[in-house]
Amino acid sequence: SDAGVIAPAAVSGITVTGGESAFHATPGIERVHLSLENLIIRQNASGVSSESGAEGGILRLDMRSCKVRGNSYGIGPVGSALLRVENCTFRNNFFGLNVQDGPDASSWVVDAEVRRTRFLGNIRGVRAISVHESSMSRLEIEDSLLAGNALAVSASDENGARIDVELSRCTIV
């Protein structure tokens, strides 16, 4: 049952530029299922972001064939989220993809899958952080290219948290 979940929002074929956050979900009464396709997201503080909390934020993010460039955070969901990224390019961001669980037990997991995606010229291509003591997050990257990033992939867990990161058939240069 998806009680408290609003209907999926779908956006396709536009350019979003020059703001605080191109797409941002704030805790409230409902959780958001966001589907983004064929977008250019550039020069924002965050391309896609959310705040943690059981009462709101991004429940699911599906991103296909998008170009995310020149942002502080390309994608930066915080809290419980299901994230699927396919055939996207993250270029010249500070963080291409920043996956982080929430600070409390109500926002304890991020489940992320990235396929056929390029992380090019970012300061950090992919960063995964798990901080809550009871959290366990997962990040799987397949058939992707990480090139020219100062740091291709980093993962850290704190306070007894756990994060699993798996790369399959990826090229890192």
Image (cartoon, helix red, strand yellow):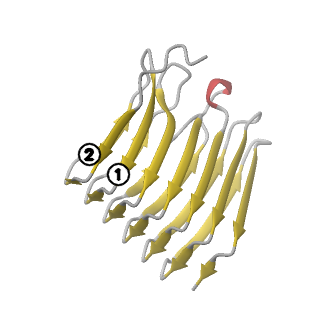
Q: Residue type at mark 1?
A: Gly
Q: Is residue 27 left or right of residue 153?
A: left
Q: Nearer the viewer, residue 154 or 137?
A: 137
Looking at the image, is 107 positioned above or below residue 72?
above
Residue at the spot 25% in from the left edge and 60% down from the top edge: 43
Looking at the image, is 136 positioned above or below residue 106?
below
Residue at the spot 36% in from the left edge and 52% down from the top edge: 37
Residue 66 screen position, x and y as percent: 37, 59
Q: Is residue 76 left or right of residue 139?
A: left
Secondary structure under the numbered disc 2 in the rendered image = loop
**Label 1 to label 2, Cα distance in Å?**
9 Å
Q: Is residue 93 left or right of residue 154?
A: left
Q: Residue type at mark 2?
A: Glu
Q: Crowdedness of circle 2 by 10 Å Cα count: few (<14), some, many (20+)?
A: some
Task: Say which label, 1 or 2, has the lower sequence index.
Answer: 2
Residue at the spot 25% in from the left edge and 53% down from the top edge: 13
Q: Which mark is residue 24?
A: none
Q: Crowdedness of circle 1 by 10 Å Cα count: few (<14), some, many (20+)?
A: many
- Which residue is at the far right? 160
Q: Which residue is mark 1?
A: 47
Image quarter in which the C terminus is found: bottom right
Residue 101 screen position, x and y as percent: 61, 40
Q: Which mark is residue 20?
A: 2
Task: Choose mark 1 or mark 2, whichever is in front.
Answer: 1
Secondary structure under the numbered disc 1 in the rendered image = strand
Image quarter in which the N terminus is found: top right
Callouts 1 and 2 close, C-beta under 8 Å: no
Residue at the spot 67% in from the left edge and 42% down from the top edge: 131
